[in-house]
Image (spheres, rainbow, N blue to C red):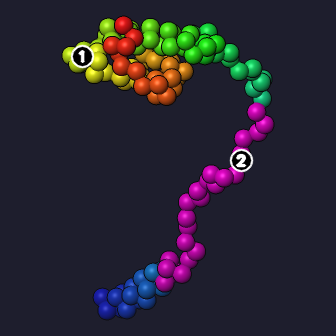
Amino acid sequence: MKNLSRSLAVPFVALALLAFACGKPKQSEVPDADKDMAGPDMAADEPAAKPAEADEKPATNEDLRAKCCATCKEGLAADRSGSAPDQIPCSDYTDKLSPWCLEFFRANPTKASECQ
């Protein structure tokens, strides 16, 4: 009886493994990142915000220099490096400068001592 159950169990197990191995593999479906599933944009078009007057470029080079030197002075007042003002370029105060002033000081290298 023991031999009979073993002789029947082995082919059944082999048949089950063969059926499992020959079956179609199941893969998870990955969403296509390039396929646009969203509908049309329903948000209303908003006009772009006008930049603040503080960030606008002054009319002349002298106005720009005066405005940017004022922000350079603010940066120098908050500077904790201990360096002498004639050693510090105004373009180092990127946290205080507007993009216009940063561009100005990169085009016209100016030390903090020249703005005092």
Which label lies toward us, 2 or 1? 1
| Point 71% across, 45% down: residue | 37
Q: Is residue 59 found left or right of 70 in the rendered image?
A: right
| Point 55% across, 67% down: residue | 26
Q: Nearer the viewer, residue 48 or 70?
A: 70
Q: Which mark is residue 1?
A: none
Query: Under tag 2, what secondary structure?
Result: loop
Amino acid type at image mark 1: Ala
x and y percentages locating residue 67 in the rendered image: 51, 9
* Circle nearer the N terminus (2, 1): 2
Q: Within the magenta stretch, is there residue 24?
A: yes
Measure the C-alpha gap from mark 2 to mark 1: 58 Å
What is the magenta range?
18-41
Q: Nearer the viewer, residue 106 or 61?
A: 61
Q: Which mark is residue 84?
A: 1
Q: Chief secondary structure of the magenta span?
A: loop
Q: Nearer the viewer, residue 9 or 90?
A: 90
Residue 109 vertical position relative to residue 37 in the rendered view, above or below: above
> In which quadrant of the rendered view does residue 85 lie?
top left
Residue 55 visible in rendering: no
Q: Residues within 10 Å of mark 2 (few under 14, many from 20)?
A: few
Residue indicated by mark 2 = 36
